Amino acid sequence: DGVLDEDTVAEGLHKLGRSAPGIEYVYLNLSLSGRELSDINILSKYIHLQKLEISYNKINDLSCISHMPYLLELNASNNELTTYFSFKPPKNLKEVDFSYNQIPKMQDLSAYQSLTKLLLDFNNIEEIRGLEKCHSLTHLSLSHNRLVAISGLENLPIRILNLSSNQIEKITGLDSLKTLQKLDLSRNKITSLQGLEEHDLLEVINLEDNQVAELHELECIEELPLLRVLNLLKNPVQEQADYWLSVIFTLLQLTELDLRKISVEEKVAAVNKYDPPPEVVAARDHMTQVMYSMLQPQRILDSTLPSLDAAYPMLVLVGPLACGKRELTHKVCRQFSNFFSYGPCHTTRAAYFGEENRLDYYFVSQEAFDKMVNTGKFIATYKYSGYYYGLGRETVESVAREGLATCVHLEAEGARSLKNTYFKPRYILLVPMNKEKYEGHLRRKGLFSRPEIEEAVSRVDMYIKMNQDIPGFFDAVVNTDDMDEAFTELSFLIKAYLGL
């Protein structure tokens, strides 16, 4: 008949221990799951219970719990409850499970301030409310309800929040949940990740089966330092080209994506694709130039000397924007005209004031530059500040035909690419040690925007670090704070190289 009796209670009692007042031994736990019970009023006499499991029954009245002042845990899931907490609150009640019932709405839980875990899955709740005074609540689950918005959670210490399988369209109301660690919003109608920013403790985000369509939404969570697990299965964004590597690159801190562990190799592949280290960029450029050059008719080059032991001589001046490398290159070629001739690079940028085509650079269109790449015309290319530069094969060959060594100037990216070729130049780093003076010099030229100047000045440290981190990359370093002194030092080095 569904009425609980003493014998059934006796079967379910377990865990003998001291009562809460500590004056007698009593049974602390009672398990009555799956017994077709509908009336449990007899439990009013069992005042010492601390854990009560009455799941999988037909119970719709929990008033007996009003007589259990020491109750800590209650599992009343899978019953026929239409209200919850309809009893005098046990002072220290911590964990409650009311999942799989027929509860239509939440009510004020101000009297349950010790509550740490509340499970209300599979009910008919349409709005989150009544939790304002639950200052100990760390785990809240309301999956499979009828929620259309996230609300009523302000300033709660929630660490685990499950709102899956509802009808939520926007991530709102989470701003004040600064302790949030795990968030499940799967099977909703969410289109944007906006609202997840600044949750520095968030480790797990489950957004499976939503409507997130754009990769740029990841920008909302890319600054979360502890994020390790992300699930975007069954979202339109998965159809984006290179989705897997794009997400990994944007969120390098992840260890699991879409229920799959991320390997170290995949992280390396993502970085190499979207922000490759300079050496990878240089290696790819070298591979490109070699591949396209091999497709062209082959001939013996003028830069190939009779002796296999002697490489064609080249001098490469390397340094940041407008540090004096172009001027010094021209002076070297004039001073040592019997030994060197200048080899202008091709570039897709427009000429600065005072620059001349063919004398300083070969200024070409992007289309013309790409055509030269595809026909194997370059020895090395690189990109700097949005423009492409390339050292042409014919540029070097024309100098070699004159019996002279080629002198060129490059940024670091170009030097890295050239290092991968069969040429063995002397690389001299030109670096302005006084950054304030260098910045003033760039401003006075009136050719560069503020971002260009800031980038150029920041690259001074990059060049210095590069010289420190890669011993032997540069054959010498020359300070260009004073151009006359720089040329004197450069001339001394060149004479030493030439044995003069």
Image (tube, rainbow, N blue to C red):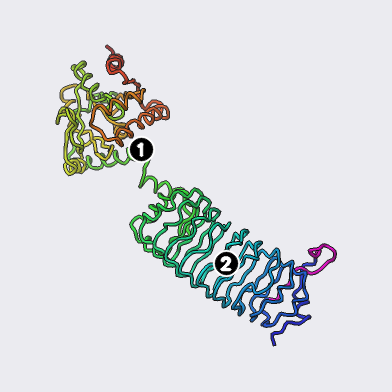
For the residue marked with disc 2, what is the amino acid?
Answer: Gly
Between tags 1 and 2, which lies in front? Answer: 2
Stretch of the chain drawn in magenta = 17-32
Q: Is 142 placed above or below 371 here?
A: below
For the residue marked with disc 1, what is the amino acid?
Answer: Pro
Q: Is 372 placed above or below 430 here?
A: below
* Residue 373 as seen in the image, left or right of residue 239: left
**Is 56 or 302 nearer to us in this picture?**
56
* Residue 188 as seen in the image, left or right of residue 23: left
Mark 1 to mark 2 CA distance (whole Å): 56 Å
* Residue 287 as seen in the image, left or right of residue 116: left
Looking at the image, the residue that sits furthest to the bottom is: 1
**Is 394 or 267 nearer to us in this picture?**
267
Can the viewer see residue 300 in this picture?
Answer: no
Residue 306 x %, y %: 23, 24
Residue 212 x %, y %: 39, 62
Q: In which quarter of the image is the C terminus?
A: top left
Label drawn at residue 278: 1
Q: Quadrant of the N terminus?
A: bottom right
Q: Which of marks 1 and 2 is nearer the N terminus?
A: 2
Q: Residue at x 24, y 38 (%)?
A: 388
